[in-house]
Amino acid sequence: MSRPQAQHHGRMVERLYLTPQIVDEVAAPALGERWIADSALKGFGLRVWRKKSGDAGKAYCVRTTDDAGRSTRRSWSHWDLAYGSSWLFREYSLGDLLERARSEARDHIDQIKGRATLADEEQLQRNSAALLARSLTLEGAAKGVLQAMAIRQVSQRSRDRTFKLFYQHVPAVLGAKLLTELTVADLEAVLSSSSLTPSNLETLRAFLGQAASVLSRFHLEGPLRFYDARDLKLAPRDRLDGCLIDWDLKSFEHALSRLGERQDRWRQRMCIRFYLEFHAPLVRVMRARWDEVFDVRGRRLRGLAEEARFYREWRWSDRPWHRERFTIQMNSHLMDVLRLVREQYPASPFLFPSSSGRRVPHIATVAHAWTEALHDLGLPFVSLKDFRERYHEELGSTAYWFDDKRYFEPPPFEK
């Protein structure tokens, strides 16, 4: 494919759509500078050069003019885009940081041209939304959460159940109350109802917490703060985990081993197993991807032929600095999951794929599998979150949490 070229101050200018692969593989000239203009963003491109000493380099660059016709130049090196982080610099190539460079270049060009930047426009939208949020009632927020559930393809049955619970147990006066005036006592009064079964109590608590937390998305707070809504208690603690008070670490390990005994709902059961070991929110575990599983040298998991006994980490794709280590046992479960996914869902990038072919390509709930697990263990209803908290408390009290014998020893770092 031929590339349009033009002369620019004695240098050859190339124009093409930059991609991470092009950025990483483009070669430096024998001597001097090569300028590749990005066809996706006018004024942005890639500088590639070679000095007389033979040293070569590359950097993203903006070349544009302001309203007065003054020429402006600015470059972003690999280190600049890594924000001075040696880890990001080592783990991500210059091509991997292309979209970050485009975003910063777009804002820089807008500032030079006297235009509102994308960040400015987003802030205006947030300010407008915040004004609307101040007039939002609990009932209005609840309807918004239900609409979001529909967008996420949550089943109609689950949405109907949640809708029914809200209007059965939330008084109309409370539903008409502004979120900016809502208090913890208001919601806990609803949750203290003796007519709520444990399962319905958990569902309503989570739903009210989401509805009451809507304000926090606009950086607004009333008497009810974000962490108050997030940590709403279902009931006194002894009612929830009284059945677990006498459990020791062996009791929890036995319960966890029972999760893998049944073959039905293996995706949900394995997801529960991973959730209980990790610290991440359940929704994050349900959408975990294979390209987020790395070894200590930053190499992604490639296949079943790899050595199963190997140090691995789970790194969130949007927050790569967040890492969770796989224990020896969890690494074995990871290979089991990989085998099952390769057999049943070979095209899925997720650890726990959806089998229904919906727009959401990963599982969206583990409620049925958890209810079955509690029944198999002979336990009354305990929320998955409270079970994990109690399990982690036991790990910490025995110092087993920090026992390196639970993990593979990381191989020495190779330069």
Image (cartoon, helix red, strand yellow):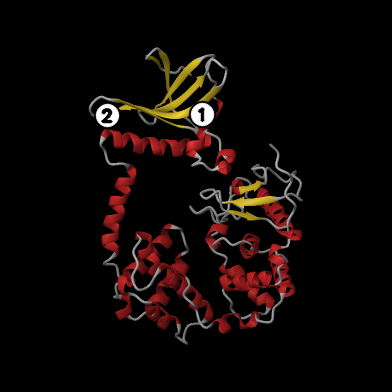
Q: Residues within 10 Å of mark 2 (few under 14, many from 20)?
A: some
Q: As shown in the figure, which amino acid type bears the numbered disc 2?
A: Asp
Estimate how packed mark 1 is, as few (under 14), some (14 to 19) or many (20 or more) residues with alpha carbons within 10 Å. many
Q: Earlier in the sequence, mark 1 or mark 2?
A: 1
Q: Position of residue 122 (x, y in %)?
A: 32, 49
Q: Residue furthest bottom?
A: 194
Residue 132: which quarter of the image?
Answer: bottom left
Tag 1–tag 2 contact (CB < 8 Å): no
Q: Amino acid at mark 1?
A: Val
**Which residue lies at the image location 41% right of the left edge and 35% below the top edge?**
102
Q: Is residue 212 left or right of residue 50?
A: left
- Residue 410: x and y in percent read 72, 49
Circle on res. 290: none
List x then y, in percent, for residue 148: 40, 60
**SS label for mark 2:** loop
User: Hey, which quadrant is residue 221 in on the image?
Assistant: bottom left
Marking on residue 66:
2
Q: Quadrant of the C terminus?
A: top right
Q: Secondary structure at mark 1?
A: helix
Res 90 → quadrant: top right
Q: Is residue 76 above or below residue 330?
A: above
**Place of residue 343 in the rendered image (x, y in percent of width and height, measured from the top left):** 68, 49
Cα separation between marks 1 and 2: 27 Å
Q: Which of pointers 1 and 2 indicates the residue nearer the eye?
A: 2
With respect to residue 91, does 193 lie above or below?
Answer: below
Residue in view at x 53 percent, y 60 percent: 283
Which residue is identified by label 1? 23
In this rendering, is residue 326 above or below 51?
Answer: below
Left or right of 411, for residue 233: left
